[in-house]
Amino acid sequence: MAPLPWTNGQILKAALTSPCDILQLRRHLETWMNNSRDRHMTPEQAMIIISQLIECDDFEDIAIVNNLDELKEAKSELSDKLCAIGDTIVYKLVQWTKRLPFYLELPVTVHTQLLSHKWHELLVLTTSAYVAIRSNNNNNNGPCTSGYNGGVSNGSPTRLSNDELQHEVGMGLCALHSVLGAMVDGAISLEQLKVEAGQLVEQLTQLTATFRKLQLCLEEYVCLKVVAMLNQEGYQGQREIEMIQERYLTALRVFVENRFPQQSGRLGELLSRLPEIQSAGELLLHTKMFFVPLFLNTNFAR
């Protein structure tokens, strides 16, 4: 399957992030975790900050394609359908940005810069977190928020075994093959799809499974989303960006320590996902298959 064209929007022309930045991110997170306990914030203050993020984040709008049936019936070319999906993603992310509590703390040019370089990571995080939270919600028969009593205890594996991973990847590729086959005339080879999208599906599957085993909650997701977007260096407004990121990192730490006191390694597990999100985001850009995480979520569409 040939690489598919992007839309003409500037956000969809974001450049790939250098792999060395992932190592830099890991070092940055380790330094922050070593120093963060000196920063005081009460659990009540943390929840106020996090609640503001939850109020402005309707992540179902980005995590799934609500008009999939319409797209299947449309007579336009596959590339046009996918570009329409891309435009919709960008629009919804822009609207989310405008609702953020700190929107007025940064110039519009800085928000544009942040979103232009991070939209693909936000898409990876949102789609993976959505599946994990919905799956745990269904299994626990309750709202998927901070009400979890479970979670992964210290030392418990949070990653799939190779056999488990390959099984879930195979299921994901079949689901993706089914959706694409319904959108175009003529069958798309499953084997060809595996070659083109297999690595991306594998990374997304592992990330989703880790979130699922951690029993990721909504409060943690919204914090990670902001932290991921603000994780940039060398840009306009760098000092202001770092101060805002610090606010939400601290809120996340306080929330996790208060909500999951028996899981001392939980914060590290959550922050360790950021380099994986970055890596999957790079691959998504490289393959230009931004539709993959969305189509993998078709079973969760409303």
Image (cartoon, grey):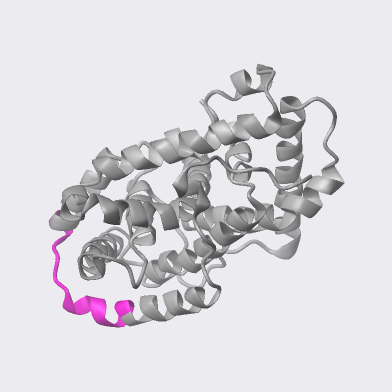
Main SS, magenta residues: helix
The quarter of the displayed image where residue 78 is located: top right
Q: Is residue 236 positioned above or below 105 on the image?
A: below
**Image quarter (top left, top right, bottom left or bottom right) of the N terminus:** top right
Point 31% across, 77% down: residue = 32
Point 21% across, 70% down: residue = 239
The answer to whether residue 154 shows anywhere in this view is yes
Q: Is residue 230 positioned above or below 144 on the image?
A: below
> Residue 71 magenta-drawn?
no
> Residue 35 magenta-drawn?
yes
Rendered location of residue 284, percent (x, y): 60, 54
Q: Is residue 196 positioned above or below 32 on the image?
A: above
The answer to whether residue 220 shows anywhere in this view is no
Q: Give the number of callouts.
A: 0
Compare residues 203 and 147 and report the one nearer the observer. 203
The quarter of the displayed image where residue 46 is located: bottom left
Span colored in magenta:
32-44
Q: Is residue 94 left or right of residue 140?
A: left
Rendered location of residue 217, percent (x, y): 39, 50
Q: Is residue 67 left or right of residue 181?
A: left
Point 32% across, 50% down: residue = 219
Compare residues 31 and 141 and report the one nearer the observer. 31
Point 34% across, 72% down: residue = 234
Compare residues 145 and 105 and report the one nearer the observer. 105
Rendered location of residue 87, percent (x, y): 49, 36
Q: Is residue 80 left or right of residue 109?
A: right
Rendered location of residue 203, percent (x, y): 63, 58
